[in-house]
Amino acid sequence: MNKTNNYWKTNLKYLVVLLIIWFTVSFGFGILLADTLNQIQIAGFKLGFWFAQQGAIYIFVILIFVYIYLMNRLDQKFKNQK
Amino acid sequence: MELQYWIWIAVGLSFTLYITIAIITRASSTGEFYIAGKGVPPIANGMATAADWMSAASFISMAGIISFNGYDGSVYLMGWTGGYVLLALLLAPYLRKFGKFTVPDFIGDRYYSNLARGVAVFCALIVSFTYIAGQMRGVGVVFSRYLEVDITTGVLMGMLIVLFYAVLGGMKGITYTQVAQYCVLIFAFMLPAIFISLMVTGNVIPQIGFGSADSDGIYLLDKLDGLHRELGFHEYTSGKKSTLDIFFITAALMVGTAGLPHVIVRFFTVKKVSDARKSAGWALLFIAILYTTAPAVAVFSRTNLIETVSNKAYAKLPQWFEKWEATGLISYEDKNQDGLVQYVADPQTNELKVDADIMVLANPEIADLPNWIIAIMAAGALAAALSTAAGLLLVISSSVSHDLIKKMIKPDVSEKGELIAARLSAVGAVMLAAYFGINPPGFVAATVALAFGLAAASFFPAIVMGIFSKKMNKEGAVAGMVVGILLMLFYMTKFKFGWFGGGSENDWWFGISPEGFGSFAMLVNFVVSITISKFTPAPDSEIQRLVENIRNPDDD
């Protein structure tokens, strides 16, 4: 029981961290802070605009693959403990 | 060779491929019909999900819409990709572990009530029908545009094809056809995009190309902002919607994506819980290829359009202009009789009307690409439209045959009987969808975008709380879903169709547009569910064990 609890708690911890990043890059950088970030220009891209139309999407993909990696590792650990 | 021949060859070959796949992979049991026998490898499922997800609208219209709205178009880019993060993290693995056939299955079992199941079926049907009516219309439009038949014939052709492989193949057939359709559509979208990027910026990768400078050393986006200012349009990289509305629309599209039954059900088709996570990752990667290219295409074609037409003599415009004028997608009226094209923001003096779809459709001609590429684009657009229609169709038929007939009306129906019912309801659903495709009710265009709001307002909270809270009970979940979907229906009919006294933009609650209201209705759903569950009995220990089981990763 305790092991299952630990597993679930670790999972929730991952979720919270990843979802904070998810929120920050899209709703944060891409929307709420877009005007401020647009003051910064990298190559031809204003940064806020870039996050809204490119950056957020790349980071979404990375987030899911990070979660896959973390959970596969956690699943393995959980199996070994049993 | 003549363009029309190329198109028939490309379309004919791709259709033969889909039908062959459907025959090879046809379903022989309800398990195969509903969820492909739980045997789909994650990468294949990712491709199938991507094809299922990207409709004719993503393929043809999205780049154009972004092109006309600039920054405001970001709501679609972030909204229709960010939802996959929610799916992968909050829903897919647990629903796969639960291991039944449909979304109402989960709601009905987790909330131990047929009332909850019934409400979920009702929501699934409303969401899927608003969505599929638009898809059938899209199929018809694509057929008619490329094959030069009228829209009705186009809808009927599309209907027959979908009918054939969805009814025969079920989920198993659809899945593998969608894999093929993804390959066709992504190739068809990327090829012209890469050519145009090369032509405009000298960079093969469109995603990098649209941040680079042209031959005069001016950054493309700066140039476009400048052109927009000159002509009185809103600056391309900033947009004109309020930040609050952008926030709410993006959230509604994200959460709606995660709540759409035809997307969720794709994660029931894999072998293991960990495969459900993997398929979500692959799906988003495959979707992101198109979704990060679309904004680049939008910038290239917007710049190209303005530079080609603005203040140029009408008589000297390139040939593609004339060709697309004949289709009515672009039209010119010389208001001040000077023979030049004034393309400006002010409707009084603007002389050019451009349909958003032209931005993708006319690309190959603008870039002067050979005919066979246009033919591949035709096949790609059809692949996008058909794959989405087929996926939706399956959700509708399984809602009727599994959730309604098997689980509620006639539980003793045999496996064979249920399979027949599934096929018959697929036939019925196609006919109804085709009818709406041929006689589109005025609400179709308005409601497709709102299907996301409806999904966000109804399913998402009930599923998430069903997994993450052991205390959530049937009273809370049912009340939340009912209040959520009714509130969303009320708001959209009020401001879109003028029911309940109608209203204009000034009457929007807190300045939130109907497209963004799904986020608000979702919050109300959460609040109502949680409040009511506090005052009603918690679910019994059996349900609590069910929730614990869903959270436990051990494979079944």
Image (cartoon, rainbow, N blue to C red):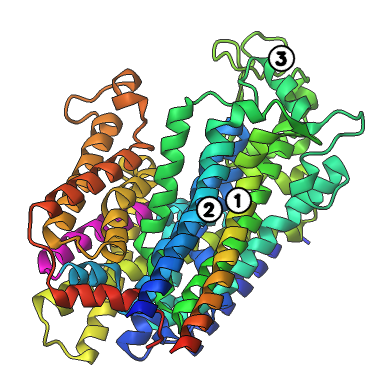
Q: Range of the magenta residues? A: B112-134
Q: Amino acid at mark 3?
A: Glu
**Split into 4 quadrants, where in the image is the N terminus of chain A?**
bottom left
Nearer-the-camera pick, B163 or B456: B456
Q: Main secondary structure of the magenta part?
A: helix
Q: Report whether residue B250 is seen.
A: yes
Q: Position of residue B67 (x, y in %)?
A: 63, 35
Q: Which numbered tag is attached to residue A57?
A: 1
The chain under label 1 reads: A
Question: Three-letter amino acid code at disc 2?
Answer: Thr
Which residue carries the number 3 mark? Answer: B230
Q: Quadrant of the C terminus of chain A?
A: bottom left
Q: Is residue B124 left or right of residue B323?
A: left
Task: In the rendered view, tell whether residue B19 sits above or below residue B516.
Answer: below
Q: Element type at marker 2?
A: helix
Taking the image as shown, residue B38 lies to the left or right of residue B10, namely: left
Q: Earlier in the sequence, mark 3 or mark 2?
A: 2
Q: Is residue B126 magenta?
A: yes
Please name whichever residue, B275 or B33, is drawn nearer the observer in this view of the structure.
B275
Q: Is residue B53 above or below residue B207?
A: below
Q: Position of residue B291 (x, y in %)?
A: 61, 51
Residue that appears at 67% across and 28% down: A38
